[in-house]
Image: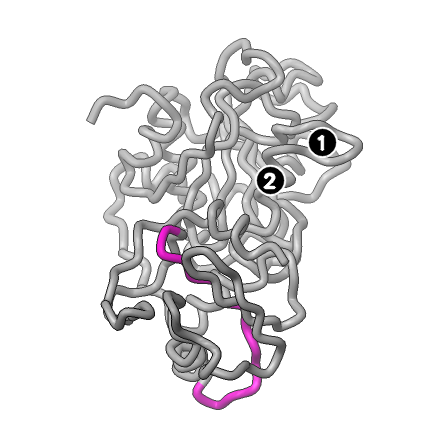
Amino acid sequence: MMITTLADALRSYGLTVIESNGWLTRGHGQMSGIRGVLCHHTAGPASGNTPSLNVVTYGRSDLPGPLCNLYLARDGTWYTIAAGLGYHAGSGGPLGNIPANEGNNYMIGIEAESTGYGDWTRFQATSYPMGVAALCSYYKLPSPTTWGHMEWTSRKIDPAQWPGGMNGFRSQVQSYMDGKPITPTQPMTNEELTEMIVAQDTSNGDLFLISGNCKLLFPQGGGDPSTAGKGNVYADVLLGMLAQAYPNGGKPALVALEHDVATRIPDAWTFVDGAMQPYKMAPPDFAALKEAIQP
């Protein structure tokens, strides 16, 4: 494949990439060049697959976005945020051949979803260093030009509690650059699947059923499947999915489905619409899912 963008570079290593709308023209001006990669964690919420996606894209009240160039979700999916300069490094350095306080201008910034307490998922454990290896290969950078934010400035601790620290991370990056065979990550369990789809910015246990032209809310504890139908995905199918994911009961979850909103529901799980016609889900688009499940 011809590699012309960050997205192409990541895909060349077999990684899943979602290209955010407008990312090719997003940024605080153009970067002066790429001399390294700076790794971060978001310090975001403990639940959800992409709870910090909106923040890293559009910024905060005190700091306008974009706040990085790339974003890594908990399920190992990469999101392109900005081809231009992102506000991620802050003051720091010098480091290697990066001048002091010029990190944004010379380093690709990656924000990976994590609370900062070592809650890296098994998907990120492979995808994070593999993605950095793809970038280093694309920009012809040696892996030592991969740093943690903690190494750029003493004000920060990210990416915190990566196994083996940044030296271990760089070793993983180098292994992938050297062509180390990649052991496929085992598919998500049902529980992991629902964790990835649920609770993007809320953890109150509400169950949302979204379909076609309406949105139904089933409060914590379930809902009445008899209210489904008339073009909606049947609520009892969703409730059955939760029962399968949590056979011992207990933990409520938020699940969002729509005919044109993509999720990572396995093909083996068949859904029917109000006309009793089965349909397949589209490829994953968690950004659209996030927008759809907002209360």
State the extent of the magenta-drawn residues as a range: 247-260
Residue at 57%, 20% (x, y): give it.
27
Mark 2, Cα crowd under 10 Å, few <14 / some 14-19 / many 20+, is many
Quarter of the image with the C terminus in it: bottom right
Counting the numbered discs, the total is 2
The residue closer to the viewer here, 159 or 269, is 269
2 vs 1, front mark: 2
Q: CA distance from mark 2 to mark 1?
A: 12 Å
Q: Is residue 269 magenta?
A: no
Q: Is residue 253 above or below residue 123?
A: below
Mark 1, Cα crowd under 10 Å, few <14 / some 14-19 / many 20+, is some
The residue closer to the viewer here, 241 or 136, is 241
Q: Which residue is mark 1?
A: 153
Residue at 50%, 34% (x, y): give it.
70
Query: How would you classify the magenta stretch by its main secondary structure?
Result: loop
Residue at 49%, 18% (x, y): give it.
25
Q: Which residue is mark 2?
A: 40
Task: Give the residue at the far right of this rendering.
Answer: 62
